[in-house]
Image: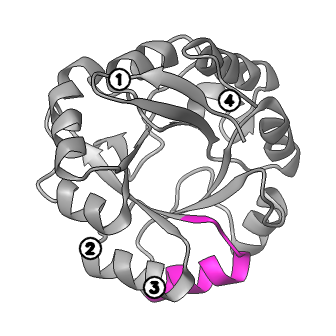
């Protein structure tokens, strides 16, 4: 697994890379070999939607050197639990309307991590950010785009969000912040410098066409994260 030691305003955190929206096993293998710590598949809808069996084929078996993530949308907590168990996932990423109760139910039933997604507009976090973050120990920050759950390619206002993210970290000590939304090889260093995330999550920013990862862009993205703080492999 890979990580870059990056100094934030009050702490030093390891930055990991998640390559999401994978639709091909070859792309997942390349992402892992390039240094990605997390491989993501989508079962929430959209053009990169996979079935359970397709997600199994793309992500492969559970193994210690990489974490396997599935992005869920309007599935119930019970449906997420079945999928996590069936696919032996490491992480369930919840883009739908999740609650503290659903997060706790999934964690309790599976023993695996849950990443609730905060759909962010402007420079403030949703009112339930601290409650969801405390229940999960992590949050994903992604852009709020009407009619879309995620994967929009829209970047957040990283500079404007600095105060809100630092306040969240003070309220929920030890919380892991996963930054998504519009990341690319050309801008990920700025995003890391401004928000010091624990994980940077990219999908469309490393694609040649929708659902197909460009191996050069993947390598450039990982290299940029390394250059932001000397990522170790």
Of helix, strand and loop, which one carries label 4? strand
The residue that disc 3 covers is: 108
Other residues around mark 1 within 10 Å, as few (<14) / some (14–19) / many (≥20):
some
Residues shaded magenta? 78-91
Q: Earlier in the sequence, mark 1 or mark 2?
A: 1
Q: Earlier in the sequence, mark 1 or mark 4?
A: 1
Q: Which of marks 2 and 3 is in front?
A: 3
Prevailing secondary structure class for the magenta stretch in the rendered image = helix
Q: Earlier in the sequence, mark 4 or mark 2?
A: 2
The residue that disc 2 covers is: 99
Q: Earlier in the sequence, mark 1 or mark 3?
A: 1
Can you tell which mark lies on residue 207? Answer: 4
Identity of the residue drawn at 53% across and 34% down: 14
Give residue 106's position: percent from left, percent from top. 45, 81
In the image, 163 versus 97, the foreground residue is 163
Mark 1 vs 2: CB contact within 8 A:
no
Identity of the residue drawn at 68% across and 55% down: 67
Q: Earlier in the sequence, mark 4 or mark 3?
A: 3
Separation of marks 1 and 3 at Cα, in angstroms: 32 Å
Quadrant location of residue 157?
top left
Q: Does the magenta stretch include residue 135?
A: no
Quadrant location of residue 231?
top right
Mark 4 vs 2: CB contact within 8 A:
no
């Amino acid at each position: 697994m890979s990580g870059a030691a990056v100094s934030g305003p009050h702490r030093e955190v390891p930055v990991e890379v998640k390559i999401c929206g994978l639709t091909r096993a070859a792309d997942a293998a390349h992402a892992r070999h390039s240094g990605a710590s997390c491989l993501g598949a989508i079962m929430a809808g959209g053009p990169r939607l996979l079935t359970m069996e397709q997600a199994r084929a793309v992500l492969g078996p559970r193994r210690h050197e990489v974490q396997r993530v599935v992005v869920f949308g309007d599935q119930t907590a019970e449906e997420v639990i079945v999928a996590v168990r069936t696919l032996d996932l490491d992480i369930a990423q919840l883009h739908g309307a999740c609650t503290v109760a659903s997060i706790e139910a999934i964690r309790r039933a599976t023993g695996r991590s849950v990443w609730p997604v905060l759909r962010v507009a402007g420079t403030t976090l949703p009112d339930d950010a601290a409650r969801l973050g405390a229940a999960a120990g992590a949050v994903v920050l992604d852009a709020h785009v009407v009619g879309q759950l995620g994967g929009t390619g829209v970047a957040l206002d990283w500079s404007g969000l600095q105060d809100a993210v630092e306040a969240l970290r003070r309220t929920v000590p030890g919380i892991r912040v996963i930054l998504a939304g519009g990341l690319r090889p050309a801008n990920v260093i700025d995003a890391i410098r401004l928000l010091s995330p624990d994980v940077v999550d990219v999908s469309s920013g490393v694609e040649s066409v929708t659902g197909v990862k460009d191996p050069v862009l993947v390598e450039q993205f990982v290299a940029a994260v390394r250059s932001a703080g000397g990522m170790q492999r």
